[in-house]
Amino acid sequence: MRRSALYLAVAGYGFRRYATYRIATAAGVFTNTVFGFILAYVFTALWSERPRLGGYDEAQALTFVWVGQALLASVALFGGGVEGELQERIRSGDVAIDLYRPADLQLWWLASDLGRAGFQLLGRGVVPLGVGALAFELALPADPVVWALFLVSVALALVVSFALRFLVGLSAFWLLDAAGIGAANTVLSTFFSGMLLPLTVFPGLFGEVVRWLPWAGMLQVPADVLLERRVGLGVLSGLLFQLAWALVVLLVGRWAQSVAMRRVVVQGG
Amino acid sequence: MVEGLRAFGLVAWMWIRSSLTYRTSFVISTLANVAITFLDFVAVLLMFSHIETLGGFGLPEMALLYGSASLALGAADLLLGNMERVGTRIRDGSLDVLLVRPVSVFAQVAADRFELRRMGRVLQAVAVLAWALPRVDVDWSFGAVALLVVTLVSGAVIFGAIFTLGAAFQFWAQDATQVLNAFTYGGNTLLRYPPTIFGRELVRGVTFVVPLAFVNWLPVLRLVGQDDPLGLPGWVDFLSPLVACALCGLGALAWRSAVRSYRSTGS
């Protein structure tokens, strides 16, 4: 019981830490909104050339754009958050302090990252989606149950995203300077999450494969839940898909963590 | 000026050597950088697997827009992209170290943590342009080639001036780097699509307020023989170098007054 209180407190600090940077948050909202407008115009042109591309009508495609902007910071679709910090702490040796704590390394960082994500969902998610809804005709659901399911899916997306970025961060134990892996992770998560183009637009076998990768759980699945393209059993299978990837990648992270712990050398002085 | 370039070269070379220390990571990050722009362009290819034209532009014309925007941003990002880090240096007080050295602060800030792997974007942009140039329906006379070359240089200078303005802005708003991203990366995203698909207000904004349209839109429209959606007089298409110079002047003024008004955080 005390354990869960500890992680809850860590999540709370993660939330408050990001809440401190008000100007940065406002700047982020501005950027997400600008990108939203640019992409919305591109998608409008694309969908007027090919109506019902990828199974979406124009309003759904535009909703996809703005949901992507609303989740970008929170789900860290461009990377960021835990991976950079963890790398820096491994490089500087501060990670020794993390290991000294009476808490599990992975769970500690998960709690902290969920706190960060929670703030950014409110701070950088609500406003861009609101602006998008005012400026364009979006296909947002009226049913609160759909919204609740969407939030569950977003929570799972956060865990999948964290699990991947934790792995990227841990790679610093072997590479020391893991900026390269970080950059590679950004590429993969931007392209394979559907951030550049919904995954349903990807053609043929390539599209099939892409929709089964873990990154699909970071944007494509939550967006499809909100757009009611997944209903009933479809929602359930989507959530299970996310849960399965979250567990698999978390377990890989756990294994990598235990291997890293065996080779960590803490320098004194 | 020469002194500043020398300082830039020395600091940049130091960071290149330091990044080569972790060789595996350097190789991976350079490849990742090439892959960023590659997958980015794959998204455009995926779009064109469903459509013939977008806003009156075929795939080769789109590739011309894409390559020219990407090359302009890539070159500016390579040379001045890390200026945004000045906000961090102001917050933690380490800017003071740069101020007491007898070298141009601008050169030091610009070369701060110079990343050679950003060549990845430049290389990819060149590759996309090389694919596009023989395929677009353009009569490559001497004038057309000159216009393209001048455009690419001016475009890089315009983005460079925006990075400088953004860095100067950091002196007032210390953690607002994200705003800069809207103009640089956002601008790059905007400029790789034809202006015809955007709302008139947006096109007006990036022509007259933040003159991104001069990076590639206006000259490329002239090259491929299309009118701009605002119906501007034809000579406007040749103004990119002038706009670049004006923005540089503005950037220099902003940077000077920012450094002059700087007060250290102390400690």
Image (tube, coloured by chain):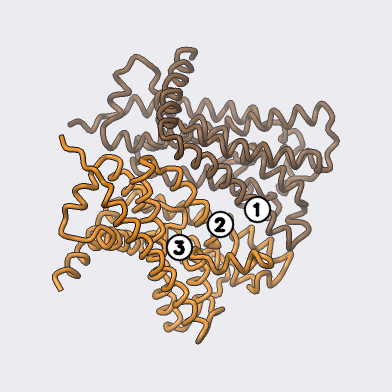
Chain colours: A orange, B brown
Around disc 3, counting alpha carbons within 10 Å, would you say few (fewer than 14), some (14 to 19), or many (20 or more)? many
Residue B249 lies, with reference to residue A237, above or below; the image says above
Residue B229 image position (x, y, % from top left):
72, 49
Image quadrant holding the N terminus of chain A, namely bottom left
Q: Distance between the residues labelled 1 and 2?
A: 9 Å
Q: Nearer the viewer, mark 2 or mark 3?
A: 2
- Mark 2, residue position: A191
Q: Position of residue A42 (x, y in %)?
A: 64, 58
Question: Are the two marked residues, 2 and 3, in contact with CB atoms closer than 8 angstroms?
Answer: no
Disc 2/disc 3 C-alpha distance (Å): 17 Å
Residue A196 at what x, y percent from top left? 57, 57
Q: Are dots 3 and 1 on a single chain?
A: no
Under circle 1, the secondary element is helix
Q: In the drawing, does residue A8 fall left or right of residue B130?
A: left
Q: Is residue A33 left or right of residue B57?
A: left
**Chain label for disc 3:** A
Residue B42's disc number: 1
Residues marked 2 and 3, same chain: yes
Q: Name the residue: 53% across, 74% down.
A: A224
| Label 2: element kind | helix
Compare marks 2 and 3 and give the one earlier in the sequence.
3
Amino acid type of disc 1? Val
Query: Residue B216: horizontal and vertical position, in percent?
Result: 67, 39
User: Where is mark 3, residue-wise?
Assistant: A70
Answer whether labels 1 and 2 touch (C-beta < 8 Å): yes
Q: Mark 1 lies on which chain?
A: B
* Image-quadrant location for residue B166: top left
Of all chains, the one bearing label 2 is: A
Residue A126 in view (yes/no): no
Q: Three-letter amino acid code at disc 2?
A: Phe
Quadrant containing the C terminus of chain A is top left
Q: Nearer the viewer, residue A6 or B70?
A: A6
